Image: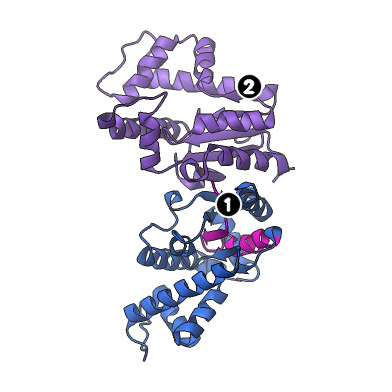
Chain colours: A blue, B purple
Amino acid sequence: MSKIKVVTIGRLYCSGGSSIGKLVAEKLGVPCYDREIIEMAAEKSGIPMSEIKKYEESIINPLKKPISLFGNVEDISEKIFAAETQVVYDLVEKGPCVIVGRCADFILKNKVKTLNVFIYSSLDKRRQTAMGEPHNIPEDEVDTRLKKYDKKRGDYYNANTNKKWGTKFSYDLCLDSGRLGYDMCAELIAHAVEVSK
Amino acid sequence: MSKIKVVTIGRLYCSGGSSIGKLVAEKLGVPCYDREIIEMAAEKSGIPMSEIKKYEESIINPLKKPISLFGNVEDISEKIFAAETQVVYDLVEKGPCVIVGRCADFILKNKVKTLNVFIYSSLDKRRQTAMGEPHNIPEDEVDTRLKKYDKKRGDYYNANTNKKWGTKFSYDLCLDSGRLGYDMCAELIAHAVEVSK
């Protein structure tokens, strides 16, 4: 495959996707963009972070429908995605990078050569991660929380792309971070970029 | 993860799993075992290859129920799997290797450190492969054939293991051979073995 410019990382909640993204970026000497893209999008779109957070909360808990000056849920969702798309374009213009989440695989499809990665691990491993630092989720809430956050990610991805979140066919490479370890995952992803030409 | 001794490869039909297995073995300088395991198992179990082929045919086409001196379908299936298990144990005793198919990931679970890989690619890519050399499957039969052979592999795996064939959670690493190319897949698998310790 031709030279990979951008690594995009999708991930199950508490599977270590963000940490692995950072490690890949370190190995390659490029920046890693994660949730800061939301802040940049907030600035670009004029929708304040407080509104975006309300909107995100409403996906996790549909009973909390946001009341907003910026339109209904669908309007805000579209505005946020449009702003994030523009932020992703701008970041990629600056040079090679790693992008965690934000449907970057789909956004960049015809823009630049990407390696689209998905990180997963067993429910047991994710439970352990969820109960540890920095998440500290109480044991009796872990399963509900994992399910909710995965659903939130899946719904966001499925609503904004023509692909299905989490199925291997939506990605080039899927890695079990629990079995392989974070460093091995990062090593393999970085190696793919290095040997691509 | 600790030093990987054996690479096991599961694969969708016509996704290049066998070719990638050979390439990995070449890169690592170890043997690759594929369908020859069936012949070795035939010899070990005393069930002739002609009977095993009849049995395999019956999975693809359930109307062709084999009539056999070696018992009913379930008996033969169990005998074949027991013989294949023993062959896999014997081969692994000889040293590091690559094993394509035969539920080797499950068979070796508590025996030796394995890297369990699954190779897939898009339906379009697999159609192209199926219609080319050496398969030469006619266009109007391709979809049926891909479906049947995948089902055969899935049924065999699901019947003989406590895992589910093809789902990413059953493997450590899943690679899209159509997007990455066979050589990149082999390179990443071999690299995982090389850097494991």
- Residue extent of the magenta highlight: A1-26
Query: Mark 1, chain letter?
Result: A
Observer-nearest of A190 and B58: A190
Helix, strand or loop at disc 2?
helix
**Residue B177 forms part of the magenta stretch:** no
> Which residue is at 39% across, 37% downward?
B126
Q: Which quadrant of the rendered structure holds the C terminus of chain B?
A: top right
Q: How far apart are marks 2 and 1 (CA)?
A: 38 Å
Amino acid under label 1? Lys
Local crowd size for mark 2, using a 10 Å CA cut-off: few (<14), some (14–19), many (≥20) = some
Query: Depth check: A20 or B137 in front?
Result: B137
Report if residue B196 is visible in the image. Answer: no
Which residue is under mark 2? B91
Residue B41's disc is none
Q: Answer few, some or many: residues within 10 Å of disc 1's Cα (few below 14, many 20 plus, some between 14 and 19).
A: some
- Residue at point 55% right, 53% down? A121
The quarter holding residue A51 reads bottom left
Residue B79 visible somewhere in the drawing: yes
The residue labelled by disc 1 is A3
